Image (tube, helix red, strand yellow):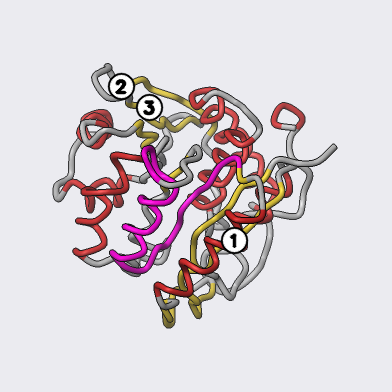
């Protein structure tokens, strides 16, 4: 059977842990064909980001045109977008009301696992102004939510404040408590919902956010409803973290495992 197609619009990771490397392997694990649009080339490893080369906006647009003109894209996700002009481009092409709208998962990659900043004030303003209001689901962690809001709030309040911009929010990465951590699901105009799931304690977590948001996009491409897709994406990501927690790769925070079959419930 011909697979569904998802496209990732993101940067590369020379260490193979995050960005497009995580997105494309996650799509494949979930039976979805992955296309890609490269927004930035990064030199990074398990210790941090060494340098970033942003792809010129016309070339980003040309890549996106090539994918959309030829493949039946069923969902899209964003990672590091690199500049405000690329944020505008993605919103105008893929978001609600855009030229070719599809279910769009926005992972606002503003801060790397190592702490490196990957988005400036102009990028943050563009996210708030044009991209979040047209996204299907936005998946910030606590640091990214703080950057987008300009202040630190308790997780359910942060999720609600971001949802007030017009998007459904899946705020990820709550502090582990008794083997569980809690994500928050917020829909505009509704009370936020706690989504507890397994917490996997590991130093090998480089690429967790990319893996999680890519799994969500793949599941939307397969036709899952957004809330069910969020639940299954959390299970998929926990499975990947368990699979690689004993690995010894690199001198810093090692990669999430992408060498195992997807758990049965997500296939």
Circle 1 residues within 10 Å: few <14, some 14–19, many ≥20: many
Residue 258 picture quarter? bottom right
Q: CA distance from mark 2 to mark 1?
A: 32 Å
* Of callouts 2 and 1, the N-terminal one: 1
- The magenta stretch spans residue 177: no
Does residue 210 appear anywhere in the picture?
yes
* Of callouts 3 and 1, the N-terminal one: 1
The image quadrant where one finds the C terminus is top right
Helix, strand or loop under label 2: loop
Residue pointed to by mark 2: 192
Which of these two is toward me, 178 or 106? 106
**Residue at image location 51% in from the left, 28% down from the top:** 197
Relative vertical location of residue 195 with respect to residue 202 in this rendering, above or below = above
Which of these two is toward me, 252 or 12? 12
What is the x, y in percent for residue 172?
40, 39
**Residue at image location 17% in from the left, 44% down from the top:** 152
The label number, if any, that marks residue 36 in the structure image: 1
Residue pointed to by mark 3: 185
Q: The magenta stretch spans which residues?
A: 74-98
What is the x, y in percent for residue 247?
68, 60
- The magenta stretch spans residue 90: yes
Relative vertical location of residue 185 with respect to residue 33 in this rendering, above or below = above
Which of these two is toward me, 68 or 172? 68
Disc number lying in front (3 or 1): 1
Circle 2 residues within 10 Å: few <14, some 14–19, many ≥20: many
* Of callouts 2 and 3, the N-terminal one: 3
Q: Residue at the far left: name it.
A: 151
């Amino acid at each position: 059977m011909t697979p569904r197609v998802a496209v990732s619009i993101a940067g590369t990771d020379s260490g193979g842990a995050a960005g497009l490397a995580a997105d494309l392997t996650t799509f494949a694990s979930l039976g979805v064909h992955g296309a890609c649009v490269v927004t930035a080339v990064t030199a990074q490893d398990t210790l941090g980001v060494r340098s970033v080369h942003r792809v010129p906006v016309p070339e980003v647009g040309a890549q996106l045109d090539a994918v959309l003109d030829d493949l039946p894209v069923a969902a899209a996700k964003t990672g590091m977008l690199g500049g405000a002009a690329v944020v505008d481009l993605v919103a105008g092409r893929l978001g609600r009301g855009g030229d070719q709208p599809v279910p769009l998962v926005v992972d606002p990659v503003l801060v790397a696992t190592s702490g490196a900043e990957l988005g400036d004030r102009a990028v943050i303003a563009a996210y708030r102004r044009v991209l979040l209001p047209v996204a299907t689901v936005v998946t910030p962690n606590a640091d990214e939510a703080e950057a987008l809001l300009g202040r630190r709030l308790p997780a359910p309040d942060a999720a609600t404040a971001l949802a007030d911009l017009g998007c459904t929010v899946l705020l990820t990465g709550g502090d582990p408590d008794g083997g569980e951590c809690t994500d928050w699901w917020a829909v505009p105009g509704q009370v936020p919902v706690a989504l507890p799931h397994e917490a996997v304690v590991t130093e090998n977590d480089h690429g967790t956010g990319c893996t999680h948001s890519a799994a969500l996009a793949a599941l939307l491409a397969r036709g899952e409803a957004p809330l069910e897709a969020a639940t299954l994406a959390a299970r998929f990501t926990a499975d990947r973290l368990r699979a690689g927690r004993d690995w010894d790769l690199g001198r810093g925070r090692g990669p999430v495992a992408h060498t195992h079959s997807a758990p049965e419930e997500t296939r």
